[in-house]
Amino acid sequence: MTGFNEKNGILHADDVPLPQIAKAAGTPCYVYAASVIRQQYERLAGAMARAMPPGKQPLLCYACKANSNIAVLSLLRSLGCGLEIVSEGELVRGLKAGFDAGKIVSTGVGKQKREIAACLKAGIHQFNVESIPELEMIAAVASEIGKNANVVFRLNPDVVGGGHHKISTGRKSDKFGMSVEVVQKAFAAAKTMKNVKALGLSMHIGSQVFTVESFREAFEKIPALVEGLRKAGHTVSRLDIGGGFPIVYRDEKLLDLDAYAQWVRDIIMPLDLEIIMEPGRYLVGGAGVLLTEVLYVKETQDRAFLIVDAAMNDLMRPALYDAWHGIEPAQNRSAPATKQYDVVGPICESSDIFAAQRPLPAMKQGDLAVIRTAGAYGFSMASNYNSRPLLAEVMVNGNTFDIIRKRQSYEDILRGEEIPGWLKK
Ligand SMILES: Cc1ncc(COP(=O)(O)O)c(C=O)c1O
């Protein structure tokens, strides 16, 4: 069986019972099912393959900010993905996971000089450039180190996309991308620069975009822009159409991937461009759960709190975006949901709450629960807040599992900190 399913009243990841993983890795820990990552890759690549001919297939550059464990990266590389990175750290991870630098694209509004240099030295496919000052910096670094940079310009299409205002990136009030006029100026500026080759455009309108028409609306802005640029004598041979594909956390309407692929075929393909996509959440979100143990059940006059050993530093999304995650017991799953719990972590913040008034079976100290759909923007956003060790990550493959990241030790947490001499006893 693939994914997270119940067998004999116990939740399994593929064929491995979650209590067995809790015993081996401790809790809290993230558990990823490789089978789900494979399935999601095949769904997305399959929709594109059905809509467009083999020679026109997009390169799927996995947006590794969603989950950057090198085991996850290696799996996606083995399936044929390229990589989208936003920092030198992600470049290092990508190269360590064996990605060909020629399949890596660098994005982000604030690329630092050393990051640009590292990407140029590695020989990445392209920089997705977000402003003219950034273009000038890339040109300067490229000339300083004697390399050439391939760049595309990120269009801000001024459309609303993204499942929460904090993950919408394509409105003109957002810090991302450039207007049509600035893109045109950037192409003209690049022509005057020796070490820079402007090759096309990119866009990314947001994450968890379930207003699916936003994708089409953004695509429809591309043909006139491309034709105008070509008429002005510029090369436009690449288009990066970004990520943002939604997944189901609760009851969201899913994007019809076949319809999306047909928009790409009908609106973009006639422009004869190399197409790149940057899916993140879609590939890994549903592939992960956060496995946690109940520390205490605290009943007050007002409510019942389930205090678990996972906290907001392990999974930020509820605190950051008011995100809804399914929460389920990992054992005794046939018990009826007779209780309503506030499921909270141990951190000293009222925002350290995973769910309010959630119907669940009665639970007790030591029981295991899972927070569902936590494979994307889960571990990758985790922190050491309250000096809590970064948690372990586990990958299940059929009936076997591996700890793909050890829980941090306290030495790990303290590494690099120093008490100045004048404060030492
Ligand atoms: C430039 C860029 N590309 C791709 C992504 C991935 O988005 P998602 O995980 O929603 O597919 C992001 C996410 O923020 C992004 O900023």
Image (cartoon, rainbow, N blue to C red):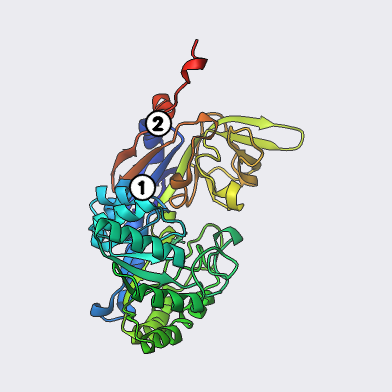
Query: Are there few (<14), some (14-19), or many (20+) residues within 10 Å of tag 1?
Result: few
Residue 5 placed where, x, y %?
41, 50
Rendering quarter of residue 61: bottom left
Q: Residue shown at 50%/10% (left/top)?
A: 425
x, y (%) of residue 386? 55, 31
Of the numbered discs 2 and 1, the one sitting upstream in the chain is: 1
Q: Nearer the viewer, residue 332 or 247?
A: 247
User: Can you see residue 80?
Assistant: no
Residue at horizontal 40 percent and vertical 24 percent from the top = 411
Q: Residue furthest bottom?
A: 231
Residue 145 located left or right of residue 25? left
Badge 1 element: helix
Q: In the picture shown, does residue 420 fall above or below 182?
A: above
Residue picked out by circle 2: 408
Q: Could you tell me residue 271's position as x and y percent?
A: 35, 85
Secondary element at image label 2: loop
Residue at screen point 37% across, 71% down: 152
Specify whether 335 is left or right of 193.
right
Q: Residue 89, labelled with which disc?
A: 1
- Mark 1 near ligand 1 (CB under 8 Å)? no
Amino acid under disc 2: Gln
Is residue 90 placed above or below 406 in the rendered structure?
A: below
Whether residue 291 is situated above or below residue 214 in the rendered picture: above
The answer, for residue 96, to whether it is visible in the render is yes
